[in-house]
Amino acid sequence: MSVDAVPPPLGPPVRRRSPASIVWIVVLGVLLIAALTGGTLLLLEVVRLQAQTQELERMGDEQRRLLDEQEAQLDEQRTFGAAMEDFMAKARSLDNVPIGGLVALDEIESLAVEAWRQRHSPTAVAQLRDEVTERADALQTVLDAAAAQLASNASGTLGESIVDGLASGHVRVVYDDPAPICGGDPIGCVSSDDPTLIHLDPSDYDAEYFDDELRTLVTYHEFAHVLQFTNPGPTESAAGAFGGDWEFMADCYALTATGSWSLDRRVWRDASSYWDVSVGYGRVCDETQREVIRGWLGEVGFHYRPVSQEAA
Ligand SMILES: [Zn+2]
């Protein structure tokens, strides 16, 4: 019996893959999965780096802001320091000038302390610097006026030259009638309204019966009033030695400063005639009182000292 061969059923031809192809497919699949996974990881990494960059930028901005802030603070502190140096240089030129009230060093020191306390606020430090600058400008005006006063003896008198020497130009002398200013009939006077202006009456001061010793005594007496008015603290304690009498004290200053023990003078008119002239208030102070005057002179006026930014 013959067996017919049964033909294979019709249909698409079946492709047989070789084992090598299957291996490649598996390898490619693995690579694809690896690539996809890697891509995801890469994406995650990029996102993470972006976040880090933003954080760094944010931190950078903050640091820049802090640096700018610190720079602004330092700038203001530097300009405040420069203003202080300018003021102190001017103040130093007034060291030992006996006129009180020329330099408010305690107030400047308070501004310096405040500037240190507010050192983190450029606005506050700038305001304080402006105050210091304003005071330095005012001090310069005082110095300029004194320099102009010293530059010439406008009246050409002994009185003005004595006062210029004693006050470094910070006190003026005017020759006028002191009566309307101080009352009575004084040879000279100083008013508390303008305590650095000495009035001298030319009708006495330049009179024939006055000599230079008398002019000198009167000028010193009036200068004592300038010191009294402008140095109230030291004056109050020193005046106790004179029973609180400022005129007696002023006479004592005049006698001490000129080394004199008398307020009376005999002024010879010619070989046979003279005037006996008295100035002052009739009392000659003793050595103890003169010592008080010397102590007072050590306290009056301005004495330069460095200032501190540390609160007292
Ligand atoms: Zn007097």
Image: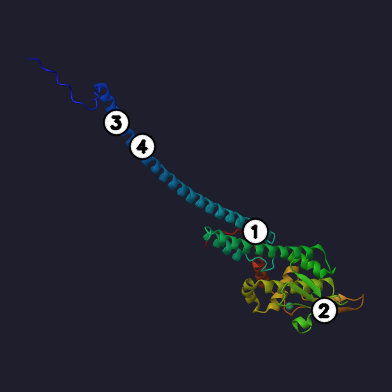
Question: What SS does tag 2 mark?
Answer: strand
Between the residue at mark 2 and the residue at mark 1, the CA separation in whole angstroms equals: 47 Å
Tell whether 186 sits left or right of 249.
Answer: right
Across and down, in percent, residue 5 comes to 14, 18
Give the number of the mark in front: 4 or 3: 3
Residue wearing tag 4: 39
Say whether disc 4 or disc 2 marks the residue closer to the N-terminus: 4
Say whether disc 2 or disc 1 marks the residue closer to the N-terminus: 1
**Amino acid on which disc 4 is placed:** Gly
Is there CB contact under 8 Å for labels 1 and 4? Answer: no
Q: Extreme left residue here?
A: 1
Tell me, yes or no, if residue 247 can be seen here.
yes
Is there CB contact under 8 Å for labels 3 and 2? Answer: no
**Amino acid on which disc 1 is placed:** Met
Say whether disc 4 or disc 3 marks the residue closer to the N-terminus: 3
Q: Which mark is residue 29?
A: 3
Residue wearing tag 2: 277
Residue wearing tag 1: 88
Q: Extreme top residue here?
A: 1
**Amino acid on which disc 3 is placed:** Gly
Give the number of the mark in front: 1 or 4: 4
